[in-house]
Amino acid sequence: MDFRKVPNISIDCIIFGLSTNGINILLSKRVLNMHDDQYPVIDDWMLTSGYIMKDESLDEAALRIFSNLTGLKQVYYKQFGTFGNPDRVKNNKDLLWMLSRDINPRVISVAYYFLLSKEKVTLKKQNVKWFSIKQIPQLGFDHEDIIASAYDDLKQKVLTEPVIFELLPDKFTLNELQQAYESVLDIKIDNRNFRKKIISKTYIVPLAEKRTGVSKKPANLYMFSRDIYEKTKSKHQLINF
Amino acid sequence: MDFRKVPNISIDCIIFGLSTNGINILLSKRVLNMHDDQYPVIDDWMLTSGYIMKDESLDEAALRIFSNLTGLKQVYYKQFGTFGNPDRVKNNKDLLWMLSRDINPRVISVAYYFLLSKEKVTLKKQNVKWFSIKQIPQLGFDHEDIIASAYDDLKQKVLTEPVIFELLPDKFTLNELQQAYESVLDIKIDNRNFRKKIISKTYIVPLAEKRTGVSKKPANLYMFSRDIYEKTKSKHQLINF
DNA sequence: ACAAAAGTGTTTTTGATACACCCATGC
DNA sequence: GCATGGGTGTATCAAAAACACTTTTGT
């Protein structure tokens, strides 16, 4: 690998993890000690970022950064936007942080989001923590905007493509699926109508297996077959706005 | 304005223009003369690109490049992807072109598309030409891929948001609207059903005005009211995949 | 036996699809 | 007066929405 970095450009990773409490985002700690190790000058949170190496594609760089953090490969990811306004550096903390790392303040970030079931990850690093999307702390730079933008894109995507399954374990119950939709889209769905609709899809396959332990009555498990999905998806989508 | 360029990064503009022959794309000529002015070493087409100035946002840079070319402001535009693979430079022509302009071959391009009715533009520059999306010539770099990606994004967008109107004149007939959908999506639509559906939308407003001259029977004109659209759009979108 | 989540059907309403002819005007 | 694109209505079918109770299990 060519380890020289492409200057001026970074990759930002927004990692969405679904669990029973809803959608979460994995953030990295931003700490800067200057005078006193006990009292850092900066101590807050930011997205996980990294650089692109000279011989890497953007996707490869994003995946490398993500894998370093989570140990996972083979997850759904999407490049959803690029952020490079001159006013991304919002305050003295941001500026100080960049100076301390000798980073050009005019960095352009290509942003990716990743989807996974929170249970799949055992975190590899300290200084990394899950936050509910509803309780994101103040972040450095324009990272709050980037998260909002990623979340908008995700909501859109969930409505038009079967990415919801990327947020669930491989085998899931219908109620888990419904809750996934409800928390991503922040809506309520009628349980009977939802089941009717889902069960009518050939690519959602009932398994001869039940989830026990979690609740009283064991629930049937299902899986998503991308195979069947690809073969059966009808071409005529509707104009719908 | 700070005229220093941000290194390594460029903006690519995909300009979609609709006219009666369907969707067109505006391309710039790529010419390089070395030994003989009569016989250029390179003579083909590419997307219109440009640099970002140090104090510009990405959107501002894209708009500036677009306006220089078309003289227009106030058009719909969208940043839809960023392209920066190390293998973007595909052949000797590409390499030669970059060397001749002292461009780093590892450039990352933030790509925007613009939507307009082709009639709105009077081209400001030579060396620029409209091509039907169905007859794009061989282009430099990965620009064919970028166009394909832009067009995919546009089709998706047209199905879920009222951007089709950006491709039409402010006042349009229902058949023009139908043809717009048909050529963007490359589908056939039943005329009666289409009219029924469109007329039922409150935000498509019939005008007391007709288009004459073009055809035999004068056609009623309509306009799109974004105002009404915003006020009436229902929150409950459907899960639709 | 009871608490808790899983699972189930019917009716109404809405929107999608299929389909063929007359109309108003310019020439 | 005729060629050309503009405009119209009905019947069928599919899917969405509204709505409340029974079942199965663990404890």
Image: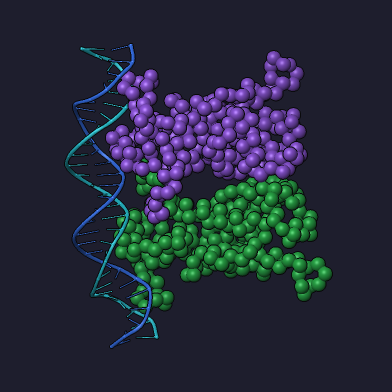
Chain colours: A purple, B green, C cyan, D blue
Asked if residue B33 is positioned above or below residue B81 in the image, the reply reads below
x 76%, y 73%: residue: B39
Report the side of A75 relative to B107 (left or right): left
Where is residue B114 drawn, in percent x and y?
55, 57
Nearer-the-camera pick, A123 or A72: A72
x 65%, y 59%: residue: B48
Where is residue B7 drawn, in percent x and y?
74, 47
x 65%, y 26%: residue: A30
Could you tell me if residue A106 is visible in this image? no
Residue reaching furthest to the front: A208
Asked if residue A106 is positioned above or below residue A117 in the image, the reply reads below
Where is residue B44 drawn, in percent x and y?
68, 66
Report the side of A117 relative to B84 (left or right): left
Which corner quadrant holds the C terminus of chain B? top left
Q: How many marks?
A: 0
Could you tell me if residue A25 is visible in this image? yes
x 64%, y 55%: residue: B142
Asked if residue A159 is positioned above or below residue A49 in the image, the reply reads below
Nearer-the-camera pick, B68 or A196: A196
Nearer-the-camera pick, A53 or A140: A53
Where is residue B71 drawn, in percent x and y?
61, 63
